[in-house]
Structures are given as C-alpha cells and as structure tokens.
Image: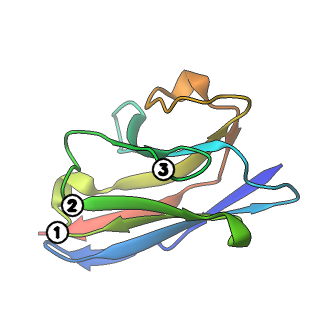
C-alpha cells in the first residue's frame, strides 16, 4: 500500500496549488484525508473525503478556500488550494483510513501515509 503526494511548490500570498494523492498497488477504497505539518507544530487535519466522495470535511482554517475531490477511476484524491496564505506553509500529507466509514481529521485514525509534499506561501 503506497500513497504518493505531489503538487506542492512555492507560491505567493493569494496564489493557488492543486495537490494530488495517488495510490499504487491497491484500490483507493478508503477515507482519505489531507494533513499538514508546519515546523514546530503538530500535524493537523486539513480536509477529508469519504470513499464515495459524497461527504467532505474541512478544517475551519481552510473552509471556503480549499476543495477536496476524488477520482476513484484514477485512484487519486485532489486538494485544490486557493487564496493561499503564509500560514498555509507546511508539508502536506495524504493518509488513508482502513475500514473506516466516517471522516476524521485526527491523525490517529489513519493507517497509511504518503511521503509529503512541501507547500510554501511567500508574503
């Protein structure tokens, strides 16, 4: 079971990025959540999506700016990030929860993690 996160980069305040989380070696039939971790801070949940994609959850800090989606045919989950702020700077990880139905933004419920992709927003 491998997850690969990509799409990070350096953008200016107010810019946009789209992150991708691609599963290899298995069908992405899991709840998937994006997390982020800034230097010196705890890992925090950003946005999660149910297995079908019908339910989504967002942290208050990103509501209205980030959009999560998935394409199960492509085994991929996306995180569209708009109106980025310097506070969004972090390493972003995608994670899969095995056997879970509900979405949680708590890291302890997730079994598989991608390697992370750096997002840097300059002011």
Across and down, in percent, residue 8 comes to 45, 70
Assess disc 2: are there few (<14), some (14-19) or many (≥20) residues with their C-alpha within 10 Å of its C-alpha.
few
Q: Specify which label sits upstream in the sequence, 1 or 2.
A: 2
Give the labeled residue for mark 2. Answer: 65
The residue nearer to you, when weighing 52 against 46, is 52
Describe residue 31's horizontal placement relative to residue 79 as left or right: right
Q: Specify which label sits upstream in the sequence, 3 or 1.
A: 3
On screen, residue 20 above or below 61: below
Describe residue 51's horizontal placement relative to residue 12 as left or right: right
Give the labeled residue for mark 3. Answer: 54
Depth check, mark 1 against mark 2: the one in front is 2
Q: Specify which label sits upstream in the sequence, 3 or 2.
A: 3
Find numbered disc 1 in the image and state the secondary structure of the residue it sits on: loop
Describe residue 93's horizontal placement relative to residue 66 as left or right: right
Across and down, in percent, residue 54 comes to 48, 50
Q: Residue at x 54, y 43 (%)?
A: 50
Find numbered disc 3 in the image and state the secondary structure of the residue it sits on: loop
On screen, residue 22 above or below 108: below
Give the labeled residue for mark 1. Answer: 83
Asked which colour scheme the image uses, the reply is rainbow
The answer to which quarter of the image holds residue 112 is top right
Residue 106's disc number? none
């Amino acid at each position: 079971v491998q997850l690969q996160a990509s799409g990070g980069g350096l953008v200016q305040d107010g810019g946009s990025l789209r992150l991708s989380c691609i599963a290899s070696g298995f069908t992405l039939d899991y709840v998937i959540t994006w997390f982020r971790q800034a230097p010196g801070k705890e890992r925090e949940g950003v946005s999660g999506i149910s297995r079908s994609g019908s339910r989504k959850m967002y942290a208050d800090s990103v509501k209205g700016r980030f959009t999560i989606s998935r394409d199960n045919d492509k085994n991929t989950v996306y995180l569209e990030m708009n109106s980025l702020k310097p506070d969004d700077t972090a390493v972003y990880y995608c994670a899969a929860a095995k056997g879970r139905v509900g979405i949680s933004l708590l890291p302890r419920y997730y079994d598989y993690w991608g390697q992370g992709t750096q997002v840097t927003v300059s002011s």
